[in-house]
């Protein structure tokens, strides 16, 4: 090794050189270089399908690269699977959660690392639980370590993944969109943990589509575009617009392309909805209106939406569509009556990952569009291709499995599926989670287009810039109740800002 290489090896924990990877006809990565310094938070930025997760999975030994070499902690790094990566000192929080629902929090964190009684093979559950309890406390995560994973919300499960990844004493932790299901408070907890880790010399690779986070927590940023390495810069030296144009390859001039359209009659009225996690919720949404709903995770936003859509039961409350009282007992009934809902958890509820993209897209509208017994496949192909084009879904073929899509493109397919039902009321729960900045503004533009056609849109979101940029009206949920309402005029005039909304979320 030359002295120059030696110095680099000292400064850098990870040096990837010339990495290429193809999946069938898709070149996911081409000759990519990527270096991470010791003790830094390094953002990896790129549009949906740019190759970020693929590169990280190669480092974890989940994919084998076609070409390239990796040096980790000064030594050539050979990895055959995640166990090798963990042993070397690299752990990863995956974009798609992978915990086992039957296991408890403690069992999940210490899977294959459980305590035993001395050398005996019998598991010492009490000791493992105690270790987990200490770990959870360190993260300020108030849960019993004996709770089964299946009982956790998406955000809580994400926190457990984060805690687990940090528990390996790793030198490098890869975080693939760790905050996509976290709210403001949980995100701040995570950031505190990240600062704590880096102060101990640990390096973090941080992947996120939320640009604000890059500037808050990252030191350095590298950009991938369509499988190619674009460059690396200190975060302090770049602007948000510069990053966006580098990753998208063009300028995104208007991040929130809200078009005000005529707001018509009340389409959906919710009256006195009460159930598990929400009490006496009353609101209405009009044709052409985009109603934003925000609040902390656990404030009852998603639960209320699930009850409207017939996914969860309510104990009391009434629902009116166009002034007529309706009863919805199941999602099928909701769709028949013209209500569609894009769920927050695309893996759990939204997609059949092993089925073709085309089938996933047409699933919710099959009955309406193909009343004949057999599915008209030719028509299905034409229609799905059209919608895929409108949403700019990046796939080599709609016949590929949904699993082969990048995270953000999976989200677009879920959206496509519900748009194909031509709903009167469209409920979107975190519609742009994991979607890149370019595609986000495309989805916002589509929302405006549908609103202009008279659709009533309800958008649940934790991302305040999005809620404030796109809503005609905002409801703020807190502890299962509506704790405030803000209008677009108040926001545009500056009468209400982000801080006021946050304090309503916290009940101050
Ligand atoms: N197992 C697979 N089989 C086939 N194609 C794949 C597979 N995994 C990834 N790809 C393809 O490789 C490309 C890069 O995907 P990757 O998941 O790395 O993107 P990403 O940058 O993480 O995007 P996102 O921001 O949406 O998560 C995409 O075109 C994707 O469809
Ligand atoms: Mg990804």
Image (spheres, helix red, strand yellow):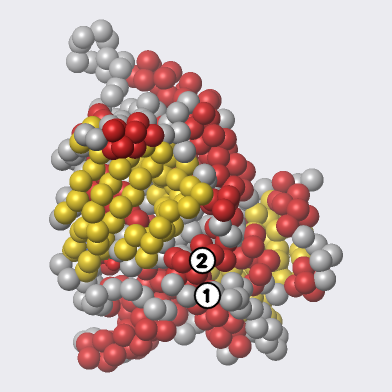
Q: Secondary structure at mark 1?
A: loop
The answer as to whether callout 1 falls within 8 Å of ligand 1 is no
The residue that label 2 is drawn on is 244
Q: Residue at x 78, y 55 (%)?
A: 500
In this picture, residue 133 sits left or right of residue 317: left
Q: Quadrant of residue 228?
A: bottom left
Against 284, residue 47 (above or below) is: above
Q: Could you say where residue 284 lies in the image, as x and y percent from the top left?
A: 69, 73
On residue 251, the disc is 1
Q: Can you tell me which quadrant of the image ligand 1 is in?
A: bottom left
Q: Residue at x 52, y 75 (%)?
A: 251
Q: Secondary structure at mark 2?
A: helix
Q: Could you say where residue 291 lies in the image, as x and y percent from the top left?
A: 65, 71
Q: Are marks 2 and 1 in contact (CB under 8 Å)?
A: yes
In this picture, residue 237 sits left or right of residue 468: left
- Where, quadrant-wise, is the N terminus in this rendering? top left
Q: Could you say where residue 156 lies in the image, as x and y percent from the top left?
A: 48, 42
Decide which of 196, 179 is in the foreground and name it: 196
Q: Residues within 10 Å of mark 1 (few under 14, many from 20)?
A: some
Against 96, residue 38 (above or below) is: above
Decide which of 328, 339 is in the foreground and name it: 339
Label 2 – label 1 distance at C-alpha: 7 Å
Q: Residues within 10 Å of mark 2 (few under 14, many from 20)?
A: many
Against 338, residue 84 (above or below) is: above
Residue with the most extreme front position:
3
Q: Residue at x 47, y 38 (%)?
A: 40
Q: Which mark is first along the chain, 1 or 2?
A: 2
């Amino acid at each position: 090794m030359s002295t120059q290489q030696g110095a680099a090896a000292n400064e850098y924990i990870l040096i990837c050189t010339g990495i290429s990877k193809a999946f069938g006809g898709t070149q996911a990565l081409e000759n990519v270089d990527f270096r991470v310094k010791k003790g830094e938070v390094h953002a990896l930025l790129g549009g949906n399908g740019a190759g970020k997760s693929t590169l990280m999975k190669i480092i974890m030994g989940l994919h084998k690269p076609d070409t390239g070499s990796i040096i980790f902690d000064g030594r050539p790094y050979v990895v055959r699977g995640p166990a090798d990566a963990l042993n070397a000192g690299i752990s990863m929080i995956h974009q798609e959660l992978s915990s086992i629902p039957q296991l408890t929090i403690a069992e999940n964190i210490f899977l294959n690392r459980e305590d035993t009684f001395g050398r005996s093979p019998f598991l010492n559950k009490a000791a493992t639980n105690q270790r987990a309890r200490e770990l959870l406390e360190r993260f300020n995560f108030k849960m019993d370590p004996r709770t089964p994973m299946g009982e956790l919300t998406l955000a809580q499960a994400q926190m457990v993944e984060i805690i687990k990844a940090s528990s390996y004493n790793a030198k490098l932790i890869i975080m693939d969109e760790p905050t996509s299901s976290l709210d403001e408070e949980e995100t701040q907890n995570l950031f505190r943990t990240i600062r704590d880790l880096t102060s101990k010399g640990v390096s973090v690779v941080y992947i996120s589509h939320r640009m604000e986070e890059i500037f808050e927590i990252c030191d350095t940023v590298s950009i991938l575009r369509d499988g190619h390495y674009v460059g690396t810069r200190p975060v302090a030296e770049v602007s948000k617009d510069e990053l966006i144009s580098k990753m998208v390859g063009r300028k995104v001039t208007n991040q929130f392309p809200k078009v005000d359209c005529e707001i018509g009659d009340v389409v959906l009225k919710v009256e006195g909805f009460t159930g598990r996690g929400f009490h006496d919720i009353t609101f209405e949404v009009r044709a052409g209106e985009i109603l934003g709903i925000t609040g902390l995770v656990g404030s009852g936003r998603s639960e209320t939406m699930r009850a409207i859509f017939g996914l969860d039961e309510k104990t009391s409350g009434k629902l009116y569509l166009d002034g007529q009282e309706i009863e919805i007992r199941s999602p099928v009934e909701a769709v028949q009556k013209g209500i569609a809902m894009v769920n927050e958890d695309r893996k759990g509820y939204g997609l059949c990952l092993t089925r073709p993209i085309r089938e996933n897209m047409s699933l919710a509208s099959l009955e309406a569009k193909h009343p004949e017994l057999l599915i008209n496949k030719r028509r299905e192909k034409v229609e799905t291709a059209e919608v895929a084009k409108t949403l700019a879904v990046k796939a080599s073929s709609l016949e590929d499995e949904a699993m082969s899509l990048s995270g953000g493109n999976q989200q677009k397919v879920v959206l496509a599926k519900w748009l194909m039902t031509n709903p009167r009321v469209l409920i979107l729960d975190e519609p742009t989670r994991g979607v890149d900045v370019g595609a986000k503004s495309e989805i916002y533009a589509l929302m405006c287009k549908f609103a202009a056609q008279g659709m009533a849109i309800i958008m649940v979101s934790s991302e305040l810039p999005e809620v404030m940029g796109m809503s005609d009206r905002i409801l703020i949920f807190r502890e299962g109740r509506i704790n405030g309402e803000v209008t677009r005029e108040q926001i545009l005039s500056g009468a209400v800002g982000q801080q006021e909304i946050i304090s309503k979320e916290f009940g101050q």
